[in-house]
Amino acid sequence: MKNLIPIIAGTILGIIIWKFNDTSGEFGIGPLVFILICAAGGYYTWGKFK
């Protein structure tokens, strides 16, 4: 549960980057993978590994 906040922060950051990028396209599998990678990056960066 304590790792949920970093995952949500990474997801929100991924959505913001995708939405406000000049070259972003329609929502599909590419942006979804990018948002999932950002969520994993948030977990890796701010989450706690034990």
Image (cartoon, grey):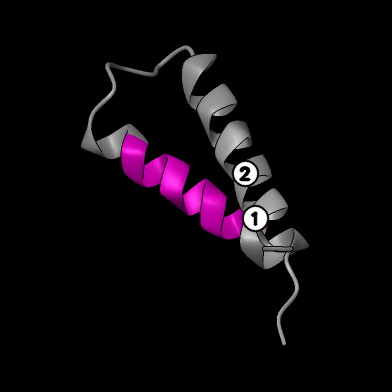
In-front residue for pair 30/6: 6
Q: Amino acid at mark 2?
A: Ile
Q: Which residue is painted at 63% across and 34% down in the image?
A: 13
Q: Tell me the tag on residue 30.
A: none
Quadrant in the picture for the C terminus: bottom right
Where does label 2 land, which residue? 8
Q: Is residue 1 left or right of residue 17?
A: right
Q: Residues within 10 Å of mark 1 (few under 14, many from 20)?
A: few
Query: Along the line of sight, which residue is nearer the eye, 4 or 45?
Result: 4
The answer to whether 34 appears left or right of 6 in the picture is left
- On the picture, is 48 further left or further right than 12? right
Q: Is residue 48 magenta?
A: no
Neighbours of disc 2 within 10 Å: few (<14), some (14-19), many (20+): some
Instruction: Classify residue 50 as left or right of residue 32.
Output: right
The x, y position of residue 47, in whole percent, is 72, 65
What residue range appears in magenta?
Answer: 32-42
- Mark 1, residue position: 4
Q: Residue furthest front?
A: 1
Mark 2: which secondary structure? helix
Instruction: State yes or no: discs 1 and 2 in contact (Cβ < 8 Å).
Output: yes
Q: Residue at x 38, y 19 (%)?
A: 24
Magenta-colored segment: predominant secondary structure: helix
From this view, report whether residue 9 is shown above or below residue 28.
Answer: below
Vertical comparison of 44 with 6: above or below = below
Local secondary structure at mark 1: helix
State the residue lying farthest toward the bottom: 50
Q: Position of residue 39 (x, y in %)?
A: 54, 50
Is 36 contained in the magenta span? Answer: yes
Marks 1/2: CA distance? Answer: 6 Å
Q: Residue at position x 70%, y 53% from top?
A: 6
Which amino acid type is marked by label 1? Leu
